[in-house]
Amino acid sequence: MKISARNFLEGTVKDVHKGATTAHVEIELKGGGIVTSSITNEAVAELGLKQGTHAYAVIKSSDVMIAVK
């Protein structure tokens, strides 16, 4: 696999929660953390994502914001 993104996290699909058009895919990382991505149900099917699938969370974004007060 070759990709231009420099930030990717390796893990295993923990769960796939499908909605009407969008799914939330949980990837459990090797260190035990969880990354959740929102993708289309069509993408889930094309990638063959299901519990136990080896996958990468690829992060390519202009910004990631988290705030608390």
Image (cartoon, rainbow, N blue to C red):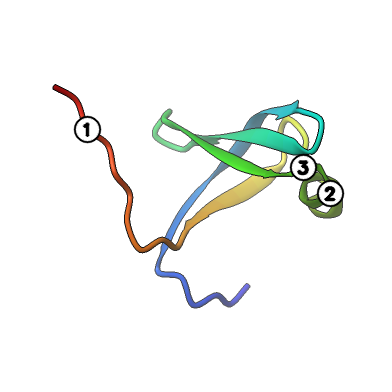
Q: Which residue is mark 3?
A: 49
Answer above or below: position of 57 versus 16. below
Q: Mark 2 or mark 3, which is nearer the start of the sequence? A: 2
Q: Nearer the viewer, residue 29 or 15?
A: 15
Relative height, residue 29 to residue 45 (above, below): above
Mark with earlier residue (1, 2): 2
Q: Which residue of the protein is positioned furthest toward the left in this rendering?
A: 69
Q: Secondary structure at mark 2?
A: helix
Q: Is residue 52 left or right of residue 65?
A: right
Callout 3: SS:
loop
Q: Residue 53: image x %, image y %?
A: 72, 41
Question: Which residue position is annotated with label 1?
Answer: 67
**Callout 1 amino acid:** Ala
In front of the other: label 3 or label 2? Answer: 2
For label 1, the crowd category at 10 Å Cα-Cα, with few meaning under 14, some 14 to 19 and many 20 or more, is: few
Q: Quadrant of residue 60?
A: bottom left
Place of residue 9 in the rendered image (x, y in percent of width and height, measured from the top left): 46, 51
Residue 54: x and y in percent read 66, 45
